[in-house]
Image (spheres, rainbow, N blue to C red):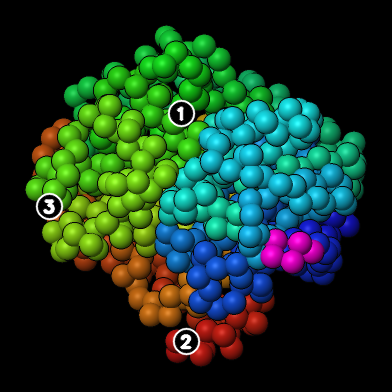
């Protein structure tokens, strides 16, 4: 097959057995790769209702047909599993040389099942797989462990690994690569830890199969040139996503004080303008010519790689107003293998609970030394850290009804860094994200602030579905970075052209949207299968945005309208071909070639 190898490496950590699975070509044509391949494998392989920390839960590491081919920002890899944070489908992507080497190993994905009795890591070199002892790596932070693995295997490898947070089953532990690249917000790193798998080291040397190499090269070179000639390119290189701090402040969506407000008087202390003055380097993923990793020296005079999400969640959301200190907390989170978004949420939630006197142990807003200590304690599940390691949803349930009203999550995944008191479409994007509250599937807030800011319109819902199909369907499955399109306006048509050249199969954007629809409906079916008692309430935005109006900034008094939100949700379901409960209709499943899902769901719910 061109564009794909047609093979998946299947590793059983319990039996220490390895086998190759050959997939039918139709699987690739119908799911592409990356997220699409991951959800299909998890649907087929995971037992219904499996405990996320059970050995029988599968971990999927997947590339797509464009992953780490010489094309713009292609060095991405997808990690997916059943989430210990949400108990539904969970995934994430990260830029890593692991994508490059997996692409050259002869496999489209690695699937890990079982659990080792003792800590191990996998060393994969083309078809050769070794189970290596990881006793000396267990307990080490990700930076130290990666250095040791590089000393053992050299720099020409790709490494995915976990830190103490993953080892200790923190529910929002991630997988880390290259000292700052992090993926798998819904606890993918914790699943890796439950399997006693410290790391995966990949080294590949095969030539990836491309149908039309010369055509691919010409299209990619033209796309690279378009990126560099973009009007926004120079500013992007200077600030990257950090420019969003000022933008969010101006548009009253900067998460502040546990999403209580959308503006913060001290926003300049963590802004992209300040970062630009103290930046010492840039980092990026393989094949990227618009690197987004801005590096500063943190409070310990060590390097910390910053972007908007971690700075907003560890800055304004918890009222920490020193960018170097924010950098220090961010670096610690990366070393521990913690998701910075959920960390900032969990800290903010507890700070508010402390302020309201709902908890005995106090935690003041912006208390840098205590926050720094808690990052380590969370990662080792010590003392108060064990409570915060459970995430916002579980903490709020244990504290009672009042706490649930300021618990900012959807389906158990903490909201990323956009306040939505005055942004109904972005609230709906969080509500319908296939992994819980995350922005990567639909950053519709940029469209929203340019159009009918406060409208609950069909136009917004149509745009939301389109963005999900492109960002969460196409980019997450190809698997390449969305930022060339989002930030420097690279034409979307380059992607079906590249896909056609790579695979030899003619693709259009509409063809890809059909695949995206299939992926979203299968992920929704997986959630229903795992939860059983599904209802549309699972797609509601956080209560805070409906009940607690803004008290500061240009939109003082604003909050979401519950009835209007519900009408938007109805529109969304209609466009997806789902019923009023948010369950795919039988006709939709048949149309999308998801007939195999029907008998499973019919045992759980009535399909309409």
Return the disc, 1 or 2, that comes first in the chain's sequence: 1
Which range of residues does the magenta coloring cover? 13-17
User: To which residue does mark 3 refer?
Assistant: 358
Q: Is residue 457 left or right of residue 202?
A: left
Q: Is residue 540 left or right of residue 110?
A: left
Circle number at residue 331: 1
Q: Is residue 518 above or below residue 466?
A: below
Instruction: Tell me residue 206's x, y (percent).
Output: 90, 42
Circle number at residue 604: 2
Q: Dot 1: what SS? A: helix
Instruction: Tell me residue 261's x, y (percent).
Output: 19, 39
Q: Quadrant of residue 27?
A: bottom right
Q: Nearer the viewer, residue 132 or 496?
A: 132
Q: Is residue 457 visible?
A: no
Q: How busy is the neighbourhood of tag 1: few (under 14 within 10 Å), some, or many (20 plus)?
A: many
Q: Quadrant of residue 11?
A: bottom right
Circle number at residue 466: none
Q: How busy is the neighbourhood of tag 2: few (under 14 within 10 Å), some, or many (20 plus)?
A: some
Return the disc, 3 or 1, that comes first in the chain's sequence: 1
Q: Dot 3: what SS? A: loop
Q: Nearer the viewer, residue 536 or 282?
A: 282
Q: Are marks 3 and 2 in contact (CB under 8 Å)?
A: no
Q: Is residue 216 above or below residue 479?
A: above
Q: CA distance from mark 1 to mark 2?
A: 44 Å
Q: Give the residue at x 84% y 60%.
A: 6
In which quadrant of the rendered image does the N terminus lie? Answer: bottom right
Report the mark closest to the observer, 3 or 2: 3
């Amino acid at each position: 097959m061109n564009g794909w190898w047609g093979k998946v490496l299947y590793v059983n950590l319990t039996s220490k057995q390895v086998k190759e699975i050959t997939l039918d070509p139709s699987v690739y044509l119908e799911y592409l790769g990356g997220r699409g391949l991951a959800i299909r494998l998890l649907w087929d392989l995971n037992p219904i209702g499996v405990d996320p920390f059970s050995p029988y839960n599968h971990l999927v590491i997947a590339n797509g047909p464009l992953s780490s081919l010489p094309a713009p920002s292609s060095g991405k890899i997808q990690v997916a599993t059943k989430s210990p944070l949400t108990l539904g489908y969970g995934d994430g992507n990260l830029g890593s040389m692991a994508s490059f080497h997996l692409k050259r190993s002869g496999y489209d994905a690695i699937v890990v099942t079982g659990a080792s009795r003792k800590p191990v890591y996998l060393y994969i070199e083309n078809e050769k797989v070794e189970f290596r002892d990881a006793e000396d790596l267990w307990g080490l932070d990700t930076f130290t462990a990666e250095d040791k693995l590089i000393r053992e295997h050299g720099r020409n490898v790709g490494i995915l690994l976990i830190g103490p947070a993953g080892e200790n089953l923190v529910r929002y532990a991630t997988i880390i690569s290259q000292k700052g690249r992090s993926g798998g917000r819904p606890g993918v790193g914790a699943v890796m830890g439950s399997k006693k798998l410290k790391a995966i080291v990949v080294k590949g040397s095969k030539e990836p199969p491309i149908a039309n190499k010369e055509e691919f090269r010409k299209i990619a070179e033209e796309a690279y040139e378009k990126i560099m000639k973009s009007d926004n390119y120079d500013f992007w290189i200077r600030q990257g996503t950090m420019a969003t701090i000022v933008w969010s402040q101006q548009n009253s969506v900067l998460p502040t004080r546990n999403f209580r407000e959308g503006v913060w008087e001290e926003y300049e202390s963590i802004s992209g303008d300040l970062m630009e003055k103290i930046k010492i380097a840039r980092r990026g993923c393989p094949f990227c010519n618009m690197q987004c990793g801005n590096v500063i020296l943190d409070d310990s005079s060590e390097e910390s790689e910053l972007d908007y999400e971690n700075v907003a969640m560890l800055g304004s959301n918890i009222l920490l107003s020193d960018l170097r200190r924010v950098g220090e907390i961010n670096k610690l989170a990366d070393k521990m293998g913690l998701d910075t978004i959920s960390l900032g949420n969990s800290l903010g939630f507890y700070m508010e609970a402390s302020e309201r006197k709902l908890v005995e142990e106090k935690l003041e807003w912006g208390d840098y030394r205590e926050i720094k200590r808690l990052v380590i304690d969370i990662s080792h599940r010590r003392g108060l850290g064990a409570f915060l390691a459970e995430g916002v949803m579980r903490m709020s349930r244990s504290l009672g009804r009042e706490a649930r009203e300021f618990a900012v999550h959807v389906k158990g995944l903490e909201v990323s860094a956009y306040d939505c008191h005055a942004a109904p479409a972005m609230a709906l994007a969080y509500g319908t994200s296939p992994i819980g509250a995350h922005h990567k599937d639909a950053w519709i807030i940029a469209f929203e602030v340019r159009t009918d800011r406060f409208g609950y319109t069909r136009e917004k819902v149509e745009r939301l579905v389109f963005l999900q199909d492109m960002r969460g369907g196409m980019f997450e499955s190809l698997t390449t970075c969305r930022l060339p399109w989002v930030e420097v306006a690279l034409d979307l048509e380059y992607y079906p052209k590249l896909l056609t050249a790579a695979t030899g199969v003619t693709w259009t954007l509409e063809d890809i949207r059909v695949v995206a629809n299939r992926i979203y409906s299968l992920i929704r079916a997986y959630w229903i299968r795992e939860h059983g008692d599904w209802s549309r309430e699972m797609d509601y935005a956080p209560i805070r945005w409906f009940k607690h109006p803004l008290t500061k900034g240009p939109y003082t008094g604003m909050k979401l309208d519950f009835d209007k939100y519900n009408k938007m949700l109805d529109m969304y379901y209609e466009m997806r071909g789902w019923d009023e409960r948010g369950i795919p209709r039988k006709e939709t499943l048949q149309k999308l070639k998801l007939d195999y899902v029907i008998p499973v769901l019919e045992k759980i719910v009535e399909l309409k």
